[in-house]
Image (cartoon, rainbow, N blue to C red):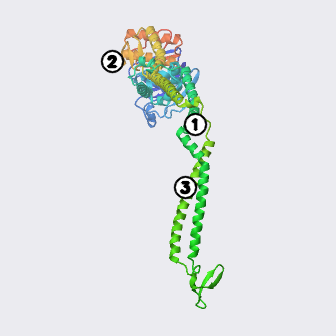
Amino acid sequence: MRITGITVSNFLGLPHFQHALTEPVLFVAGGNGDGKSSLLQAVRFALTGAMPRGVTRVADRNLLLTEGASKGYVQVEVDGNPLRRTVSTAKLTGDAPESPHLDLCLEASQFARLDDKDRRKLLFAIAGVKANGEAVSEQMKAQGIRADIIQDLLPRLRAGFEAAAAHARDKATEARGAWRAVSGENYGSTKAEGWAATVEVEEPDQAAIDEHAAAIADLRARVAPLHAAIAKVEAMLPPDKLAELQAQSDGQGKAEGDLAMAQQVYDDTAAAVAKLQVQLQPGASGGVPCPCCGKSIRIDGQRLVAATESDGTDVQKVRNDLAAAKVRAHDANTQLQVARRALACAQAAASTLANLPEAPTDEELRAPDLLADVNELLQQHERAHRALLDARAQHERAKHRTEQAARHHHDAAAWKLAEENLAPEGIPSILLARALDPVNATLAAAASVAGWRPAAVTRDITLTYGGRPYALVSESEQWRADAMFAAAIAELAGARILMLDRFDVLSPLARGDALDWMDHLVAEGHVDTVIVAGTLKERPDLGEGVDVVWLGAAA
């Protein structure tokens, strides 16, 4: 930004000023109250619209007018283009310079007055270093942080690196706790790296498991036929039972004869009972009065005939004979039932003998002993098979625990890596270094050229001069630091203009070094224009390369 002309009308203590710059370095000199600072504030007002300290309200902008004046303006020719701003309204005519940090180059002491947050923001901006989510994400990727962890952390970065680091620390602690829960041991990064769950039994071979399984299947297939053979053997009748059945079967003919005889006896006794019962019926023996005539009548076969005295029967004797006949008939019936049952038993025995199953073979007779052997062998294989399956299950559980522990350990390590990178000495330090390194390199180069002690910005964003805190150095040392800070901003931010007041704070010997440094800034293309003001008793003779303006009473 090359300034070639300045015109001021009624701005603060400068009622009128006009000057065409002949050199890139303009030195404004004069006595106290001659308008030097007013000239610098006017240039600043024209370029940025910023009002001097003490004037904070827009309504007080008229206070910038020279006492007694009703209007005023400041015009600065920048790169050949006039830029004019009215004092009372701050209305701008012309295109304002596009430099967001221009004001810090026009009032050098501002940089030291910034708070840490604004100073950090400025340093990142002029160094072209971004600290947004995308930039931090890329940096985390470069540091080997897992993609899922980056996605988890990005929303928390809005609250700052400290909040994100605290979250990563909590997640690492959580992962270590999960590792302890799985392993049952205290966590240690070295221990956890190669930790594996142990199993006391040897891991079984699948072939051995398959061998026992095949044997079990074969033995179980043999059990059912053996049970069938045993059932067949158990179904056999013992010899005494067979002899009993044979004897019953052999007695079938006799039983049939006995039944026929018992049947005949029963039939005879039953007939005798019936005959006697007939004799006791009314009219069957002796006479009875006729219901019509009253004479005695009796039954003779199918006829009713008159009864005579010789027809009378001994009823009591018939009754006694009937009772005896009934006893004989009852006994005969009992014997008949016994004969029938004896014949049924003989027939059943014959049928059983006729339908006996085929006699078991010798091998079937040995089935109980064979089954005992098979069951014993089956139990042995089942026990061995269960033991192998249990061993395999133990190894599978151990493998699962090992995998779980490894996953938790990797999570703990990954979150720990994230925590370390989000700590002040991690990514913030890397990003800050990218922002500070070019600034401090520029400051060191300036100090080397001027022969001054170096000004610097530390990692905690504090300012130093010659290694000492800025606030503790002398006024002239602070001026040197402010000048170098402003020059570095002008160069790195692209403003390419430097404006310095209170040049007279330097000792006469130090002023030459300062002017040489300003010449160097212009000659090397770091800035296009330098405007410096100082209180002097007379107009200085600074030689070629420096345009001198005297605002004092006498030139």
* Picture quarter with the C terminus: top left
- Decide: is 56 above or below 421: below
* Distance from Cα at disc 2 to Cα at disc 3: 142 Å
Q: Give the image location of residue 494, x and y in percent.
A: 53, 19
User: Pointer 2: what residue?
Assistant: 472
At mark 2, the secondary structure is: helix
Would you say 512 lies left or right of 140 here?
A: left
Q: Do the residues labelled 2 and 3 touch (CB within 8 Å)?
A: no
Amino acid residing under circle 3 = Val
- Residue at 60 percent across and 91 percent down: it is 293
Residue reaching furthest to the front: 310
- In terms of depth relative to the viewer, which is nearer, 237 or 504? 237
User: Pointer 1: what residue?
Assistant: 232
Q: Give the image location of residue 147, x and y in percent.
A: 53, 25
* Picture quarter with the N terminus: top right
Amino acid residing under circle 2 = Leu
* Distance from Cα at disc 2 to Cα at disc 1: 116 Å
Q: Do the residues labelled 2 and 1 touch (CB within 8 Å)?
A: no
First in sequence: mark 2 or mark 1? Answer: 1
- Decide: is 404 above or below 27: below
Which mark is drawn over residue 509?
none
User: Pointer 3: what residue?
Assistant: 338
Q: How many marks?
A: 3
Task: Using a 10 Å C-alpha cutoff, classify the residue at mark 1 as few (fewer than 14 neighbours), some (14 to 19) or many (20 or more).
Answer: some
- In terms of depth relative to the viewer, which is nearer, 83 or 115? 115
At mark 3, the secondary structure is: helix
First in sequence: mark 2 or mark 3? Answer: 3
Task: Using a 10 Å C-alpha cutoff, classify the residue at mark 3 as few (fewer than 14 neighbours), some (14 to 19) or many (20 or more).
Answer: some
Q: Give the image location of residue 177, x and y in percent.
A: 41, 27
Mark 2 vs mark 3: give the one in front.
3
